[in-house]
Amino acid sequence: MQLENIQKFVLVLLYGGLTLLSFTVLVNPLKVNRKANCFFGLFLLLWSSYWILDILKFCGILPGSLFTSIVYSVQIFTPILLFFSAVFFINPNYRFKKADLVCLILPVIYWILLFYSKGNLIIYNAVLLIDVAHNLPYIALIYFKIRRHQKRIETISSNTENIDLQWLIKLSFLLFITIVITVGYELFNAFVYKMHQHLVMDLLFLFIVYSTLYYVLRQKEIYPVDKKQRDELLSIELESEEEEAERKKLIPDHELEGLKLRLNVLMETEKPYLDGDLNLLKLSDLVQMNAHHLSYLLNNGFNKNFFHFVNTYRIEHAKKMLTDDSYQKFSMVGIAFESGFNSKTAFNTIFKKMTDMTPSEFRKKQED
């Protein structure tokens, strides 16, 4: 009996947390990533529907067959909404295409099976498995789309820590693990032994929900609010490697060296890399060059993307501070901010990636 009460308490926290998080995301008080958060909020709302029937039952409210059918009918769209929220996070200018209608094929099959599932245990179990298992391909698609985004965002931004959608990758991974467990549980229930306790899975989902709340509230706008700037950055970021390779030369070879020298002089004298929010558009304004031309110059003249180019200067600046006695009293956080990084985590990660040691290890090695 005590275990049953604990499970009810967890269900209340889970359902309440999801509905509150859904409301928060839909209201979007920070007004960031609006289209993406609209779809993400609807995803959370549909996700909460997986527990609404249990909540109503132990509250003494018996849901009617019509209400139950409606709940089951809309649940099939849960992973689709999550997928399109990721699409709009990656590209806020995305327009729906006819090809997107393929997402409706499985829901139609699901509705047909749902209609004929009454009184047929095999079809009913098939419906339940489809409802849970069809999340997996969407989660896989989300993972690969965000991985591509994380690589492309480096072409336009020098600081990707809060705009690389790593939190959405973590959410997808946790959902994948929990759904696999859920599918195994449903198969066990259907063919081996009927169990009535879902406490472990509900606790896993509860952890995911409150972890998601933490990251959602720390969101930043991925692209500039200004439409013209956003469109320009997106047009550069979304160019594929094939297009980059096939594109005709934007800058003649004989001009590359002169432009490289001009850019190096600017970086050394004005030190724009110390601006933690430096992006491709800001640097192109400083160097008085079109953003597309600057991206071409970095790729073909320096063999680096924007992120690597700027952070190379930041790391060199940090090295000088770490070896200068006058900065001995500076903490690692202080050196990170003075070098143009927005957090100690980003500083440590990039420093180690470029030097094969942490800033602390580098300072100690210089002292020794």
Image (spheres, grey):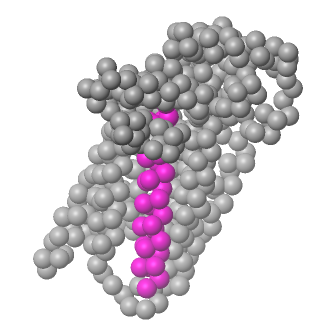
Q: Give the image location of residue 299, x and y in percent.
A: 72, 29
Asked whether the viewer can see residue 352, the reply is yes
Q: To which quarter of the image does residue 29 belong? A: top left
Q: Give the image location of residue 265, x and y in percent.
A: 62, 11
Residue 172's place in the image compared with 262, above or below, is below
Query: Quick one: which residue is furthest to the bottom in this view?
Result: 192
Q: Is residue 98 magenta?
A: no
Q: Residue at x 68, y 50 (%)?
A: 101
Asked whether the viewer can see residue 18, the reply is no
Q: Is residue 185 magenta?
A: yes
Residue 277's place in the image compared with 144, above or below, is above
Q: Give the image location of residue 165, x and y in percent.
A: 49, 42
Residue 362's place in the image compared with 139, above or below, is above
Q: To which quarter of the image does residue 152 belong? A: top right
Image quarter (top left, top right, bottom left or bottom right) of the C terminus:
top left
Q: Residue at x 13, y 80 (%)?
A: 1
Q: To which quarter of the image does residue 138 belong? A: bottom right
340 sits left or right of 330 in the view: right
Q: Residue at x 34, y 70 (%)?
A: 201
Q: How many marks?
A: 0
Q: Residue at x 49, y 68 (%)?
A: 132
Main SS, magenta region, reads helix
Q: Give the image location of residue 186, x and y in percent.
A: 44, 79
Camera-side residue of 301 and 199? 301
Camera-side residue of 81 and 328? 328
Residue 60's place in the image compared with 323, above or below, is below
Start-end of magenta stretch: 159-188
